[in-house]
Amino acid sequence: MKINKAGVRTAKPSALSPVTTVAKDLKTFEGAAAYSRDAKSDLFLLGTTSFFGEDTFYEKANVRNDRFIGLVHRVAKEDPDWLLAFLPWLRGTANIRTASVVAAVEAAKVMAQAGQPGAEVGAARRVIRETLHRPDEAAEALAYYLTTYGKKIPNPIRRGIADVVVRTYTERSFIKWDSDRAAVRMADVIELTHPKPGRTLSSRVRNSNQSLLFKYIVDSRHRPTVVPHELSVLKSREMLLATEDKLSFINGISDDPERVAGVLSSAGMTWEQVSSWGAFTGKTWEALIPTMGYMALLRNLRNFQDKGVSDKVLKQVAMRIGDQTEVLNSRQLPYRFLAAHLAATHPVWALSLDSALQYSTANIPALGGRTLVLVDTSGSMTSGGLSANSKITPMMAGALFGVALASKGENVDLYGFADYAFPQEVRRNAGVLRTVEAFCRRSGEAGHGTQIAASVKQTYAGHDRVVIVTDMQTFGSGYNFYGGDVGSQVPANVPVYAFNMQGYAPAMLETGSTRHELGGLTDHTFRMIPLIEAGTTAGWPWEENQ
């Protein structure tokens, strides 16, 4: 008895997911018949899977960027309220930064031109204000507009950026984020957007210190300027930078980490800025570690172990890395933990990184019954990183999700596939990261093609659901060892979930009551699976708690 088991439910006919195909009118990049989606579905998948300005296997950056911007423009005209919900979620929960900034500027431009009334401050101003998070993003948004459209900035965009400036510009953020390597500096943003210091939508009271800060930022951009004594953090920084041998000073007090933390904190200095003072020793790292944020720790595990940081401090770092609250507050994309695991080999990190990954993929459900999981290992998934600076390929990120799903499920068969499928054992006590590493070492074992229909046919054996992690660019019949539509390889009442890793326009699967497309570089859309299988039509991820 493989299918007719108590407790296992298939999706009801009315259970739908929000990503929707509309017609069988495309070809995949490898020539197979494919489906087009509606604009919001395309934008959601492209936005959640891509880094703006980066090439992928099948699309150059300029083509991908143009497609992304075109989709933003279309949706901004057709459904601005949807964008006003999607973009803050994309920047916040999904933690996709550059694409969010670009989309907010492009959406605001279209909304401003269309005169969209929006909410109380105007949709165009609001989409900027609610999407941009970090202080440097105000400058990035402005730089993007200036280089793309010129100096005539629409008032709603100017005011939205000014709102971000008032909310995020502080002495500490000025020290951390202002850079002479940037084309648009914080002073330029202030001069071009004219923010009202301290005056937010919730408070009309002028902040005198912020007024002084804004004036100092602008003045110091053009000439040597005395730091006002009211700006105590900048004053402390000025004194610290005047120290003749700053790194020797830090090393000299390294046995007192609390004092180091106090000195650096009072001056608003980060470890990145201290690193410009000279080469770090293990003692330097030990002095700086208490001041470092979670992401900084994660990126420097290799430095800690190679520079001779003591075992005691390494264990303290490991405890922070594996702390659930720290992980959730950091909002790291799950693949960051795989990157850290591959870079840092000291055994002290293994358990903490695996725990951190488990916390960062908490939305991946523990599925009952039998589940078939297929992870694409084809050439298009293994050629190049997710970004120019990343060594993590789409296949690696896909394997991470596939192994995490397999490790939680009741009865899961995990396969990699390219020209054909190969099984991957998942031992629950082996750890997700070690299993992902073992899986990735098998890249190329099944060739380099993308035979999705054939691989599903080869591996499906009465499972209760099928999850395919892929870029969807299945090969056409001219190359296929076995032709056929992907969805037709599984009985119509069995749910098939295609998890899209690259956001290309051609979709291999026609969506419907038992055929669903998910996507993204986070685990959030996996929450749709149990909703769908409970017979509930799943909304967009940001709608679940509304």
Image (cartoon, helix red, strand yellow):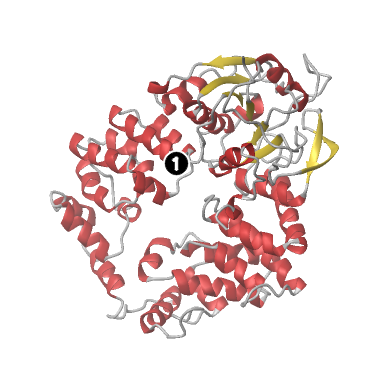
Amino acid identity at mark 1? Ser
Residue under circle 1? Answer: 360
User: Is 161 or 323 nearer to us in this picture?
Assistant: 323
Estimate the x, y position of residue 298 in percent, counting from the top left.
37, 42
x and y percentages locating residue 80 in the rendered image:
71, 64
Q: Is residue 298 left or right of residue 185?
A: left
Q: Residue 17 occupies which quadrant of the picture?
A: top right
Secondary structure of residue under mark 1: helix
* Residue occupying the point 31% across, 71% down: 234
Task: Specify whether residue 98 is in view.
Answer: no
Q: Position of residue 344 (x, y in %)?
A: 36, 32
Q: Residue at x 45, y 33 (%)?
A: 338
Circle 1 Cα neighbour tier, 10 Å, few/some/many (<14 / 14–19 / ≥20): many
Q: Quadrant of residue 402?
A: top right
Quarter occupied by the C terminus: bottom right
Residue 247 seen in the figure: yes
**Residue 336, placed above or below residue 378:** below
Q: Give the left or right position of residue 312, taking residue 104 as reference.
A: left
Seen from the viewer's position, the closer of residues 74 and 18 is 18
Q: Looking at the image, which residue is at 54% across and 75% down?
A: 162
